[in-house]
Structure formats: structure tokens, C-alpha cells
Amino acid sequence: MSRLLMAAADKVETTTETMMREFEQRIVASPPGVCPVDLQLAFLKVCHAQTCGKCVPCRVGLRQLENLLETVMNNEGTMETLELIERTAKSIQNTADCAIGFEAARMVLVGMEGFREDYISHVTQKKCIGAFEQPIPCIALCPAHVDIPGYVALVKEERYEDAVRLIRKDNPFPTACALVCEHPCEERCRRNMLDSSVNIRGLKRFAVEKIHADVAQVPKKAETTGKKIAIIGGGPSGLTAAYFLQLMGHQTVVFEEKEKLGGMLRYGIPNYRFPRTRLEEDVNAILSTGVEVRYGQKIGRDVTLEELRREYAAVYISIGAQIDKKFEIEGSQSNHVIPAVNMLREIGEGTTPDFSGKRVVVIGGGNVAMDCARTAIRANAKSVNIVYRRREKDMTASPDEVRGAIEEGVELTVLQAPLRIEADEQGNVAALWTQPQISGVYDKAGRPSPVKAKKEPEKIQCDMILLAIGQEIESESFAKEGVEVKRNRLVVDESGCVAGMPGVYAGGDCVSGPATVIKAIAAGKTVAANIDEYLGFEHKIRCDIEIPEPAMDNKIPSGRIHLTEREAIERKCDFEGIENSMSLEEAQQESSRCLRCDHHGCGVLRGGRELEW
Amino acid sequence: MVNITLNGKQIQVEKNLTIMEAAKQNGVMIPSLCFLKEINEIGACRVCVVEIEGKDLLVPSCNTRVEEGMVIYTNSPKVQSARESIVQMILSQHEFKCATCVRNGNCGLQKVAQDLNILEVPFPTEIEYQDWDQTFPIIRDSAKCIKCMRCVQICDKVQGLKVWDILNTGKRTSVNVRDNQDISKVNCAICGQCITHCPTGALRERDDTRKVLRAIESEDKIVVVQIAPAVRTAWGEQLGLSKEEASVGKMVAAVRRLGVNYVFDTDFSADLTIMEEGMELLDRVKSAAKPMPMFTSCCPGWVRFMKLEYPEYVEHLSTAKSPQQMFGAVTKSYFAEKLGVDPNQIFCVSIMPCVAKKYEADVEQVNDSEADKDVDAVLTTRELVRMMHMCQVNVDRLEEEEFDSPLGTGSGAGVIFGATGGVMEAALRSAYYFLNGENPGPDDFAVVRGEDGIREATVEIAGVKLRAAIVSGLGNTRKLMEKLKKKQVEYDFIEIMTCPGGCAGGGGQPIHDGEERAKERGDILYQLDQDSTLRFSHENPDVQTMYQEYFKEPLSEVSHHLLHTHQKDWEL
């Protein structure tokens, strides 16, 4: 007998590992709409299977929790059962010897708090609130509910114009979303159960490469209603509402403060991510429906809400979140401390900055910080340094953006909280002082909070500081005219209507706070429908395109096609687009990976394709 | 057209067909359970799976379309084995007490299991038991439900009521009344379409046959039967009779063999309904005393639907009772007097193609005779057939017989009450006579016939323009009601029948899996009308006699008391 054994690959072990990895992917692809209590029970069973069996709380306690949850699921429980579950879980949490036990119990307690209503419904109403609503994951998770399996199938058939037209049934910004959407649709793609999610955005991108949005035919407008609708703000939300309202036969008039349309798509996102020529394609298609635009119009300065209400049958406020969040630290008034939104706006207006020889510091960890940093690189800065008080992993910017920035030469200085800004005698920025942090306990959102480290402040020498710490909403003039405003955000009901002002609607960033393009588009779509109904109409937006039948050979695991980018060394020298489109071969393979949840699974029974809205 | 190879045979089939349709057109039957054309094409039961050459996984043939070059095997060893497993899985959660099941011999699951020669189930049984109100006209047995979702779909897509829903998820997924509510508390119209589209015995009507048998056995009861028009189109379907064999005369003879005392015809009271409802319509047109448009009120499913969903229109319903209830009221007044008996001595049975009629007979406010109840028991066509079995009636040996008199004479106009448009047409024939003093051609109003769920017609009678709408199916009804509410349409007279195609397609009719027979049964009614020597309700001699002897004239005080009702007061 050897004293020690060499580890050898064991079939059982490798299979188990594969299984666990697949299990993890399966959790990722959990369909929306299942009963959370049932899912909790299933998790608990997994936890119990991990138990070694040594200690009472884990061996017996988890089993008893399972029994109790089973009682609840069988609709045989009472409120006492819920109390007993809570008490038992707390005891396990307090007594278990290792994480297998106390974490399992904690998950139960978190669930009992998080979806208490579901528990209560099972014991009092003897029914599940969740019910049978497992819609198509990608469509359900797209805020605008774009028919994703539909257009993916059309791309596969090389019917690109149909694909664009189908997207436009719910979203008149196919190009913008092809280039910059955060694609929540991909999150729970059922494909994750086999390999990984379909590159939905990439396929949309391929479609709008093949046929530009302003070439794809827009639908016929309904008969003119004679109603005029004012839209305040020509960003994605306002233009979406304008587009759909035009199709419904109304006449919209967009009041835009700036010289051009597009809102943050133009004045917030740098050209290299979303080339302006591509933005024009979406805007032109929208304008082709007859939207009227008045530029240089600001509410409270050039026209009042009251006047618009008198002159128009309905008003949609979609002013976005255009101004910078104030940053109050010592020295923040120094020269060359610039809010990100200001810099990006100037670029949007056509001025290309020149930071030659400058050492630039960017404060923030979101996508805007990345935009600033990568713009600074392109503006020929000597060095660009992103300062962030948490870890790289905790950044809210998308990982691709962070990676792209690093590739282009941006340096990340993490776990450093800005302390004060040092200026020279002329009042120009000379350095940023930071306080080192350590990553601490998790906050409520599940991100570790930064805590002041027992270290001395550090000095980062620089000539310019870009503040990318968030945006604010310019809502005062609306508040003055009686629109309810909370923490600078406009308050509306679930239809998007402003309280006490029938016919006045608001949506997009100015209601939600800074969010994604697709959410702003979704708000515009919702409000368009509700304004139409408010005006006494029932216009339907539909798209009579036949969707191809699903293929049967789409179930073999295969790699997801990622979009490539121009080489960093080359792309960082200009402001041109950086992302490459798929090849036809790649688009064919990627589109054939779609599992067609519109046809398979519950989409074919309920919660499936919406032909009109 | 596309070229496919089906079980080794190369054929050309139309593009866009499902594999199941393509196979059927070529004589290859693929078993299925959950599939219902255009209503439930969800591929849930997986019984209809087939093998496609070159593909690993089997595909459901009900919702997979044929493609050029497809090589299909509908019965390969792989398919057979999978299908057997699937049916065994379904059986593990189905209480197959076939001997005591109302669908024994007419059950989709039983047929599939037999066809596949399944003799055992290798899994432990796991039956879902739920309580059910056994007094409600629709009975649901959760132990037999196979969650095919057909009831959910028919109620949602065709009837637009969404009474049935899918509750819970995962292994506890179940079908029941929406939000787990009590069936009597929701908007169920009791149309019974869920029953006629259920592949198993999970849904059936409340069985009232024993109630009737007890009355027949009872010495001091005079059992009087009325038979609704649509029953005669379908009663023979499950007795193995051809259309020609299943004649009206034979049906009368068979019913008489059950041991009842009188066999009468609901056509008689249909004619009576026309007298009252027709006059009421003219009254409304002329006097504007009551709101227009006027709706027919013969169909209790429709009356329930209106009361539940459009109560603001209840005054628009004709106050004339349905033929069933007119018959009950007449039997227990006029006829009881003729016999010289206490009305309570008469036990009035009605045989209907309908489940909602069971509800209607029990509505307290519609019972106006001196007796406790005007109609004592309602049997569906299916229950009638079961009773014939119970009483060992040998239909093969029966000679044709006549209805009894005096409530056994009906006109062709009364017969077509059983088809969509029939009530309207019968009413128009007599309205013409009432206004002009002479008969129209009997087929002058054939324009109101048809198969579409919503039809419109404008007819002119003696210079009066009548705008009519004819609707069948509650989904269609809702569409019309919404248009009416929004004033997008305007009519004078609207006929509504709850079941698609009218009573011929009623929820109480014999069940043929995957087949809709409303049209062909309706055609039988129109043929009977054609063949009838009596084509007008107002010419029914027995109805005329009854008016002379008893009611004097339509809308008289006596007829208001016995033949009219206020649906507003009806309990639901």
C-alpha cells in the first residue's frame, strides 16, 4: 500500500463535474414565470444532496424543511406551517456546522421574505400565483417585447428586410439596438441549457448591415385622425412614440432642445460605438412617417407645458436624463474638471476634442466612464486612468466595454475612492487624491461595499478629470407646472400618465432614471398605445410577415459566435466604428442555434407570439 | 407541392401541411391525443411523434410541417417504443376505471392504449383528486384529466370565457377553474363545449337518467317527454344507425320504449315561441316601448353569458321563454287541465342537445305553472342514448311511430330552431304573415342561413326594414356585443346561440373526437323543414287550438304569466 496516492482522472468525477457545470447553466436559463416556492424546494433538495450527514441541522433539519415546503406546495399548509419553516430555517442557520447547512437555510429565509406573497397564496388561497405563464424567455425579457425568434428565423432565411420590418413592429430603432443594446433578451436564452445563449444582438446587427433601416419599407399609416400630439424630447423614447403614433394616423410634433435628433444615442454614445451615419438610418425611417420636428425648443424657455396641453390632444414628456450629477468634493470646481455628459455632448455636436499630452483621470465605473476613457484615448491623451472605489468585477459597465478599454491602453485604478482634487496656482487640476479601500461586506444589492482601508491617501497626478458618476433629470420646469416629481424623476402611473393631468404622459430616463435604450423605447411604445386609447382609438400595430417554420436540426451543442472588433492598436486612433459584423456563414450558424421557443415549449400554448398590440 | 417519403412510399403533398395532415390524406393514420385542429396544436401529449430520417429526436406530427425531401416513418420501432412509453406515462396519472366511465368505448386515451396493445403500466399510479360540486351541470373528475389543455383552449379561443385554466407549475401542473375558483361562481355559460372536446371522461354532464327512471317506475307519475329539434339529428350516431335509419319516427318509438307516457315534440313549443317572440318583436319595432335591438332568448347559455358579462343589455332579451320552458309551462297548465290531473302528478322530461338546459330548468324564476317545477328533468342527447342502453331498447327492431297529440305537432319552422339562423328564419316567416296577412315563400328568408359565426342580413317586410344579425359561439358573441356597445353596428333583431353552429353542435350532443358535426346535423334539420308540409309556426294547428282554448292570443295576460319571463330576475 502506497503512503500517498496519485490523483487520476476518474470517469465518475469528470461526469459529475460536467453535470454540475450543466446544472449551473440550467439555473442561468431558468424560465421566467415558474413558481418560486417550487424552485426553492428544488434548490433545497440539491442542498440536501450535498450534505455529508454528520450534523443534525443539515441531515435532519433540511429534510424537515423539505417536508414543510412540500406541504406548502401541496396546498396543505397553514400560516403555522410558514412560521414553523421560518423557525426551523433560523435554527439551522444558527446551528449548522458548515456552509452547506447554514447557507441552505439562509436561502430559504431569503425566499420567505422575497416571495412571501407566493407562500401565503399557497397556504391561504390554496393556489400558486405563478401559474402557467412561461413565456418565450427572450421576448419576455426584452422590455419592448420584440419578436426575437421571429426575426432570428428570418435572418436564417436571408429575409433581412422582413427581419427589420418585424423588429420595427415593436421597436423603430433596429440599428441602434443592433449596435448598442444591452440585450437583456440573451440573459435566459434557453440555449444556455445546451451551450450558451444565441448572439441575438449580433444577428440583428447582421440584418441591419444587409439592409439599412431607412431602406426597409415602413408600414402604411392608418387613416388620418386629425389629432395632434406634442412630444417633448427627440431621443429614443420620444421618437418611438412619435413613430407609432404616426402609424396610428395621428400627427406628432417633436420639440427638441438641441440641433439634432437622437438624444443620448447622439449626445451620449461615442461615434466609435454607434456611428452617427447609422443613427441617421433609424431617424430617417422614423421621420419618413411624417413626424414634424421643432428644433431649439426648450420647455419653460421657449414654450410651456400648459401651452402644449392647450394646443395638442396629448403630450409625451421624454426629456431623458441629460445633465450631470453634481460631484461635491474639495477642488471639484477646478479648471479641467469636466462632467462626462458635457464632453460627450460636445462630441455629439461635432467637436472632436484634442487631449494631446494630457494625463486624464476618469471617475466612475459604468459604461459612460468607459466611453469617456476610450474617447480620451482617441483624443490623443498621454495617459488615461479610470479611478473606481470598488473592484473591477463590481463595475456596472459591461465586461466587454471594460476589456475594450484596457486593450486600448486605459489603466484601471480600483479600490480608490476620490478624496479631493488638487489644483495649481492657476486653478487648473494638478492631481486627484484618493483614499484606498478594501472590499467589504455585501450590500443589499449583493455587491461588496468598499470600506476605507487603513492606508494613507494616494496622489494621482493629472491634467484633466472626467466625471462619469451619473446623470440627472432636468425636471424643475415640469415640477413648476404641476407635474409630480420625486428625486428629480417625473412620477407617472402604470399607463405612463402624469397624475392629475389627463392626456399628459411621461416615460424613458426622465421617469426611470438613467437606464438603457431599449427601456426608453419600450416606454415610448407603451405610451403610444395608451395615448391612442386615451384619444378614443383602437389602432393596432401589426406586421403581416410569415415566420419560417423551425428547423429540426438545431439541438446540437455548438459554439456561440462572438462579434469581433477592429484591432485595438488601429481602432484607438480614430472615432470610427470598432465592432465587426458577422459573416454570412457565421450568421447562418448562429441563427440556426435558436431553439425556437415560440414553437416549442409553452409559447405555442400561451404567452407566445403577439401578432399585434 | 413537396416530395416526401412516407413509410417508404414516395409521394407528393401540398406545401404547408403538417406531417399528420399529409399522412392522413394518404391513408396513414397517426394516433394523437391532445391535438385539435386550429384549437390545440401544441404538441403536448407527444403521442403523435414520428421519426424523420437523419434526425435524432422524434417530432410531433401535429405541428411539424412537411419539407421537401423529408423521409418520415410514422411507425418505426423507435416511434413505437417512444409512443408506448408516453401512453404508459399518461396512464400512470389517469384513473382508468373504464367500466364505470361515461366515455368507455368513446375515449381517446382508451383507444390509443388499446391500439398500442398496452397491457401494463410500469410506473406507480399517481392520481390527482380534487373536490367537485356534484350538483353543477358540468362534472369534472380530476382523476381522469390528462392535461391535454383542450378544454382550456376551447373555452378561451372559441367561447372566449377562459373558465378553465392551467394552475401551478412543474409536477403540480393542473387544470381547473381559473384561479381555483368555484365553477358556479365564475362566468361559465355551461355550454358544455369543454365536454364535447375532452378526449377522456374528465368532463361530463351531470347524469340525471336515474331521476327519470325513478319517475317512470313511480305509479302515480305521468311521464311526459319533449324532444328538442337537434336531438333527432344525432341520437342515432352512437347507436350505430345511419342517417336514414335514425329517423324521427324511430326516435319517437325508442323513447316510448323507455316506458314514458307521452312523447311530445319541442318543435311544438318552438312554434309557440315564434308566436310570442314574433309578436313581441313587431311590438318593439312599432311601439319603441322596449329597447332595441331585441335578442333571442331561447339559449340559456347565452342568457347566462349576457347576465354575467353584459347585464346592461338584459332588457333587450325577448321575454319569451325558451321552447323547453314554454313546453313545461304548457304541460303543467293546459295539458294537465286537459288530462284533468294535478300538475304535480306530471313529470316533465326534456331531451336536449344542451347542458345549459339543466341549469335553465332549475332557475326558480322561470317556473310559473301551479306545479313545483315546469320541467322536472333535462337529459342530454348522450344521456338519452345511455338510457336506451339501460332499458335495452333494441333500435334495430323498432317501427316508426308518431309523436303523441296534442303537443306533438311541430312545423318546419320549429325544426330549424336547432340550427344557427333557424330561430331568426322562423320568426321572420311568421312576422311576414303577421304584417302582411299572407305567407311569404317558405324559403324567402334563407339569406339568414350559413356557417359563419357572425352573419348579417337586412330584410324588408311590409315596408319595415329589419336589420338582423345571427351569431353562434360566445367568442363571436363577445365580438358583436363589443361592437354594439361602441355603437359600431346597429341591428333590430339578433339571434344568438352559444354553441358554434347552434344546438346541432350543442354541448349535450354525441361526441366524435376531432370532428365538428354541427353543419351536417344542421343540414338534416333544413331537410326536415323542406320535407315538412307545415312550414310556418303560425299554421301549427295544435298551437292554433291552444290559443283558442287557452291563451286567446299572443302576448295575452295568460301567455304573459306562463310563456314570458324576466331574465333579469333569474338566479345564476
Image: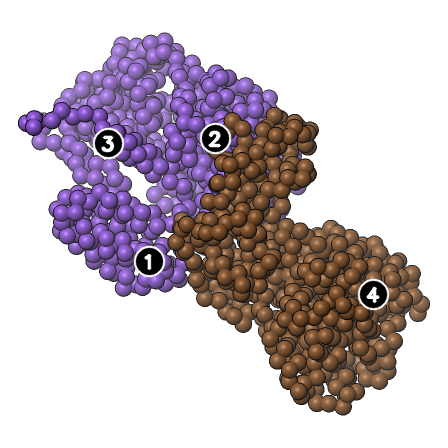
Percent position of residue A562, x then y:
40, 21
Residue B203 has which mark?
none
Q: Name the residue under label 4.
A: B413
The crowd level at tag 2 (other Cα within 10 Å; few <14, some 14-19, many 20+) is few
Q: In this view, does A263 lie above or below B481?
A: above
- Callout 1: helix, strand or loop? helix
- What colour is chain B? brown
Percent position of residue A508, x then y:
44, 37
At x 14%, y 28%, the residue is A436
Cα distance between the residues tagged 1 and 3: 36 Å
Q: Which amino acid does label 4 sit on?
A: Ala
Residue B56 has which mark?
2
For the residues beneath circles 1 and 3, the answer to whether they share a chain is yes
Q: Is residue A304 above or below residue B443?
A: above
State yes or no: discs 2 and 4 in contact (Cβ < 8 Å). Answer: no
Q: Which amino acid does label 3 sit on?
A: Glu
Comes first in the chain, label 1 or label 3: 3
State yes or no: discs 3 and 2 in contact (Cβ < 8 Å). Answer: no
Q: Quadrant of the N terminus of chain B?
A: top right
